[in-house]
């Protein structure tokens, strides 16, 4: 069984000004810098817990399926992942499980983790040193649209965040319990921001968990918009290459994507002021 993927090579760079493009004044949220990798780890885990809270509110849960992983800033050859069987809305930073590249639990809550999740995320973190977080759930619109094995069409501004920056994995091999299947997914992802897993769902990656989580939320909604457009049986207008590229270059850099997630993260903090992150 061979992995087949469709994507387009990107021969351009993102606008260097990043989030400043959408701000007429001081940018309200910036990616913090840390001198202490242990302090950075705690901050990352808290935002990871926040991402799960957001995913719970947006109803991305499906039994024990779904996972977010986070490359450890202290030992980059290891990563953190959510424990098996805990609802997204209940997860705290202290619940996360620290695993090495062989699948050994080496820290955190030391709870059991999803085997399929480990296979997928370990392969991605090995293949992509630039990826510090990856998100995958069985969200309803993502898994519905994935059945078509097709990339998103550029039918709205938000979809342009993925312009020539997402792939399709067309070789579904069942639940990912074998290392080979995880490696095929990582290969299909390539150097993209996201991959649509045929008959499975969506997977997004980023330099922060905030970036990966926002990409997931906007891709899920883009799948919903695509399904609605297809169901209308009308022919949607496709955004021309130059306009899609311009939009991508000004909205899809790490700083902008980090910024875009903060309203959802801040809302969770407001709703749960006593929650121990």
Image: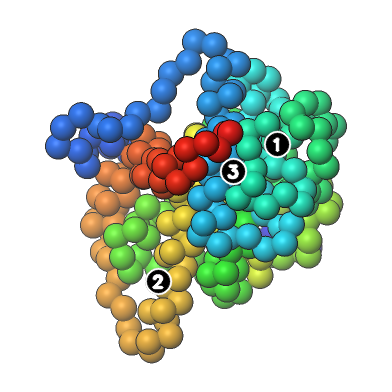
Marks 2 and 3 in Cβ contact (< 8 Å)? no
Residue 111 seen: yes
Q: Quadrant of residue 102?
A: top right
Say above or below: 63 vs 81: below
Number of residue marks: 3
**What is the spatial separation of the Cα atoms under label 2 and label 3, in whole angstroms?**
23 Å
Mark 3 burial class by Cα count in 10 Å: few <14, some 14-19, many 20+: many
The location of residue 244, given as percent across then percent down, is 29, 57
Name the side, left or right, on which 270 lies relative to 276. left
Mark earlier in primary sequence (1, 2): 1
In what quadrant of the picture does the C terminus appear?
top right
Give the residue drawn at x 34%, y 58%: 158
Question: Does dot 2 land on a helix, a strand or a loop?
Answer: helix
Give the residue drawn at x 28%, y 36%: 19
**Residue under label 3:** 134
Say above or below: 188 vs 171: above
Mark 2 burial class by Cα count in 10 Å: few <14, some 14-19, many 20+: some
Marks 1 and 3 in Cβ contact (< 8 Å)? no
**Which one is closest to the eye, mark 1 or mark 3?**
1
Give the residue drawn at x 46%, y 59%: 219
Name the side, left or right, on which 213 lies relative to 180. left
The location of residue 82, given as percent across then percent down, is 70, 42
**What is the spatial separation of the Cα atoms under label 1 and label 3, in whole angstroms?**
18 Å
**Residue under label 1:** 95
**Residue under label 2:** 225
The location of residue 26, given as percent across then percent down, is 20, 29
Name the side, left or right, on which 124 lies relative to 216. right
Question: Does dot 3 land on a helix, a strand or a loop?
Answer: strand
The location of residue 90, given as percent across then percent down, is 64, 46
Marks 1 and 2 in Cβ contact (< 8 Å)? no
Question: Does dot 1 land on a helix, a strand or a loop?
Answer: helix
């Amino acid at each position: 069984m061979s992995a087949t993927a469709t994507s387009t090579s990107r021969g351009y760079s993102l606008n260097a000004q990043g989030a400043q493009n959408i701000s007429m004044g001081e940018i309200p949220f910036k990616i913090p810098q840390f001198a202490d990798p242990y302090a950075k780890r705690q901050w990352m885990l808290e935002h990871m817990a926040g991402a799960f809270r957001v995913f719970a509110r947006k109803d991305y849960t499906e039994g024990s399926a779904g996972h977010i992983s986070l490359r450890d800033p202290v030992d980059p050859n290891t990563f953190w992942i959510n424990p098996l069987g805990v609802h997204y809305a209940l997860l705290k930073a202290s619940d996360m499980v620290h695993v090495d590249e062989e699948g050994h639990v080496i820290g955190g809550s030391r709870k059991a983790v999803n085997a399929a999740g480990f296979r997928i995320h370990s392969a991605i973190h090995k293949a992509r040193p630039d990826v510090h977080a990856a998100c995958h759930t069985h969200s309803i619109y993502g898994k519905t649209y994935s059945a078509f094995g097709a990339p998103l069409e550029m039918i709205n501004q938000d979809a342009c965040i993925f312009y020539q920056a997402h792939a399709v994995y067309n070789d579904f091999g069942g639940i990912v319990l074998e290392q080979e299947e995880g490696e095929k997914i990582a290969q299909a992802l390539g150097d993209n921001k996201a991959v649509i897993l045929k008959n499975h769902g969506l997977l997004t990656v980023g330099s922060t968990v905030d970036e990966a989580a926002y990409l997931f939320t906007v891709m899920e909604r883009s799948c919903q918009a695509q399904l609605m457009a297809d169901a209308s049986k009308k022919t949607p207008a496709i955004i021309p290459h130059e306009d899609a590229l311009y939009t991508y270059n000004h909205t899809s850099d790490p700083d902008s994507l980090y910024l875009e997630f903060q309203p959802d993260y801040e809302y969770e903090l407001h709703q749960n002021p006593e929650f121990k992150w």
